[in-house]
Structure formats: C-alpha cells, structure tokens
Amino acid sequence: MLFDLKSGKRRRVVQIVFGFLAFIFFISFVGFGIGSDVSGGLFDALGIGGSGDSGGDVSSQYEQQIEEAEEDVADDPKDEKALTDLARYRYLSGQENLDFDESTGVAVLTDDARTEWNSALDAWEDLLKTNPKKVDVQVAGQMICAYAPPLPQCQIQAPTGDVNFKGAAATQELLATQDPSAENYAALAYYQYSDGNLSGGEQSAAKAVGAAEGSQRKKFEKGLDKLGEEAAKAKKAQEKAAEAGATGEEPGLQNPFGNLGGDTGAGGLPPTSP
C-alpha cells in the first residue's frame, strides 16, 4: 500500500490539506445535522469502534476465519465472498491490535494494526478487480477507515500522512453507485476533494445536492460549496508547497487547526454549532 511516511514535507502538506478539509467537513455536515442518519452508507455501517482493550487473543480469535478465507481464495482468486471475508477478518484482527489513548478517548494505530489492515486492503483491492455488482456496506466502511484512519468518523489517531484518499474515494464510489443517496455522494465528494480531485468532487457534490430532498438540499449545497472552495484553496497551497520544495525552500505553510486530522485524529475536532 502507498503510505509514504518518510517525506517530512509531504507529511506537512498532507496535514495542511487534511486539516482544512476535515474541519470544513465537520462544520458543514455535523454542524448542519447532515450525515447523522446515512441510509445504507458509510456512517451507519462502520461498527469499528475498537479501543484495543477487549482482552481477546487476536491470533486465536480470527486465525481460523482468516485461514479459511485464504484457502478459499487460493482455490478461486475471484471468489467474492472469500475476498470479502478475508478483508473483514484482517481488518478486525488489526482493530484488536489498536492501542487506546485514555487522554484523548480515541484508538491509536499501531504498526501491527497497520500490517493487518494493509493485508485487508490487499484482499479488498483484489475483490474490486473482479468488478463486483454489490459490496458489503460494513466491510466497505471498514476499508475506508483502513485507507484513512484519521477521518473524523473513524476516531483513530494515526501518523500524519497515513492516508490514501484515492482508495477511500474508489470504495465510497461503489457505495454511492449501490445506494445513490445524498449522504453517500457527499462523502464521495469529500474524499475526492481531499485527494485533490476537484472535478470529481464537483460532480459528486452536484449529485449529492440533486439527491437531497426538501430543506436538506440547501444544507447540502451550502456545505458542499464551502467544501469545494476550501479544497481549491488547499490544492493551491499544496502546489505552492511543492514548488517551494523543488527550489529547496521551506513552504512556509502552517495548519491553521493545529494537528487536526494528523497526530490527534478526530479527538482534536473543535466544538461546533449549526
């Protein structure tokens, strides 16, 4: 998996971009009461609130399911159920390897958890290569958090830069195709904007607004317009930082929200009001 944590400047740029977008996403959607009751989408589907304190023996708890899924995949590399099960149980195994920060109240990504989650994502991406007509909504939500653990809804503290919004967007696009709700398209727009895909984000935002009903339409439109504006600003900042890096200069950019979306995970989100 492409999780580049070695470049300090890349980590700084990712932190800036994620900080802008995570903040705007939280303000626009949580503050406006949007996304709290997603039907068939990511937020209702996660079931990922692991705190690392279950006390279970990880190897014995999921070893059998993982081995059975791996055997089925070995027999048929395109077995959709086996690949889904392998992604599911690798993710759950990784979840049990999370630590828990009592001071922030959030789970903390560990090397062992990341190793398991990378294996889960390998199985998931093999599944996507089979072009499945439907995917398991809960497993898809878990994979999105494996791609980008610092997302606000994931509540996982992770190293800055440990995000892959392109993978998250590809998975969310399947969910939006499977259930074309306003919430699913809004989440897709967020991931695309976070990946720097402005045109894709605009298209998904338009679909979200079009799918919204009644008074919610104005809320989605306002929130997504603000999200798009901040995404454009963040991309310009990213390009400026890249140019400065090419000339050997310090980018001179600071994340205005501290470690939001970076080392503090969702625990650093500020309070909001509608």
Image: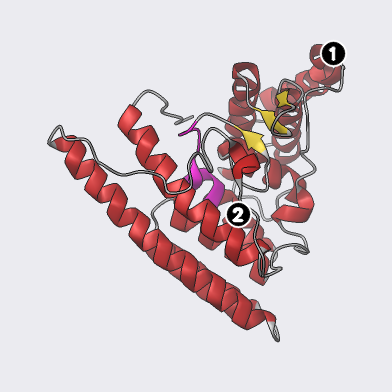
Choose top left, top right, bottom left or bottom right for residue 150. top right
Q: Based on the picture, tell me whether residue 161 belongs to the magenta stretch.
A: yes
Q: Which mark is residue 184?
A: none
Q: Return the residue at label 1.
A: 57
Nearer the camera: disc 2 or disc 1? 1
> In screen coordinates, is 173 left or right of 197?
right
Q: Vertically, is 169 above or below 242?
A: below
Q: Disc 2 on helix, strand or loop? A: helix
Kind of residue indicated by mark 1: Asp
Q: Position of residue 247 (x, y in %)?
A: 12, 36
| Most foreground residue, 130 or 89 | 89
Choose top left, top right, bottom left or bottom right for residue 213. bottom right
Mark 2 packing: few (<14 Cα in 10 Å), some, or many (20+)? many
Residue extending furthest bottom? 214
Q: Which region is colored magenta?
A: 160-169
Mark 1 packing: few (<14 Cα in 10 Å), some, or many (20+)? few
Kind of residue indicated by mark 2: Gln
Q: Residue at x 56, y 59 (%)?
A: 25
Q: Locate the C terminus by quadrant.
A: bottom right
Q: Based on the picture, tell me whether residue 159 belongs to the magenta stretch.
A: no
Q: Position of residue 135 (x, y in %)?
A: 70, 50
Q: Disc 1 on helix, strand or loop? A: loop
Q: Residue at x 62, y 77 (%)?
A: 219
Q: Residue at x 22, y 35 (%)?
A: 250
Q: Earlier in the sequence, mark 2 or mark 1?
A: 1
Q: Position of residue 9 (x, y in %)?
A: 31, 33
Q: Return the residue at label 2.
A: 172
Disc 2/disc 1 C-alpha distance (Å) = 32 Å
Is the C-beta separation of discs 2 and 1 under 8 Å?
Answer: no
